[in-house]
Image (cartoon, helix red, strand yellow):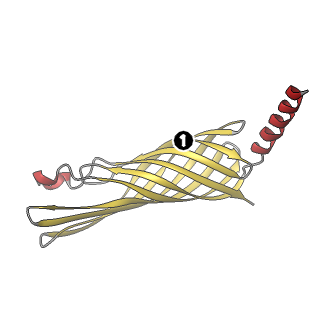
Amino acid sequence: MRKLMFFIALASLCSFAQAADNGFYLGAGVTQAKLDNVGKDFSTSNLNDFKLDNTAWKVIAGFRPLKILAIEANYDDLGSEGRTTGGVRFNANAKAFAAYAVGFLPIPVVDLYAKAGLARWETTASATGLFDLDDHGTEFAYGAGVQLHFGSLAARLEYEQFDVKHTDGVELLTLGATWTFL
């Protein structure tokens, strides 16, 4: 009897977790953003190892019209860093807005996904009394992840990457959540 009750409870949980995930969704996440060798093209040997390696945040918005396809937009705070070298203060800050097509492999309770799109990044950097730099660009971006869903709520773990000028590029590892509605 206990086994029968266990299987009934498990089947109920699985049916709840498989509820329709199609529609608009919003979410947020905590991101480990890594941007190495900031300013590597400026031939400043004492700043060649300067990097942004911060815990940052992300906002997610998307539309999933089909179980296997979504369109998603993200705002990524990539962090900031400062260093004083030889009496000169160097600061850097970065952020990005990205738009992706997302393909899902829906497995009961879990979605595996890959995404590809464009990231519009912006970096600012300054060295006291030497220079101020405000640069931006648009680059190909890609990523992959897994999400576990419980009805309209989903928890996700994802990896994303794109290039940023004068650096070795951005790598993002995000733990987030989304809520599907409509």
Q: Residue at x 32, y 48 (%)?
A: 169
- The residue positioned farthest toward the bottom in the image shown: 129
Relative horizontal placement of residue 166, taking residue 86 as reference (left or right): right
Type of amino acid under label 1: Gly
Give whichever of 154, 74 is nearer the camera.
154
Relative horizontal placement of residue 59, taking residue 17 as reference (left or right): left
Relative horizontal placement of residue 3, taking residue 34 as reference (left or right): right
Relative horizontal placement of residue 181, taking residue 82 as reference (left or right): right
Quadrant showing the N terminus: top right
Residue pointed to by mark 1: 145
2 relative to 49, above or below: above
- The residue positioned farthest toward the right in the image shown: 1
Residue 11 position in % (x across, y down): 83, 35
Q: Residue at x 17, y 50 (%)?
A: 48
- The residue positioned farthest toward the left in the image shown: 86
Quarter location, residue 179: bottom right
Residue 121 visible in the snapshot: no
Q: Residue at x 42, y 50 (%)?
A: 32
Q: Residue at x 61, y 48 (%)?
A: 155
Residue 30 visible in the snapshot: yes
Disc 1: CA contacts within 10 A as few (<14), some (14-19) or many (>=20): some
Quadrant showing the C terminus: bottom right
Residue 66 position in % (x across, y down): 71, 47
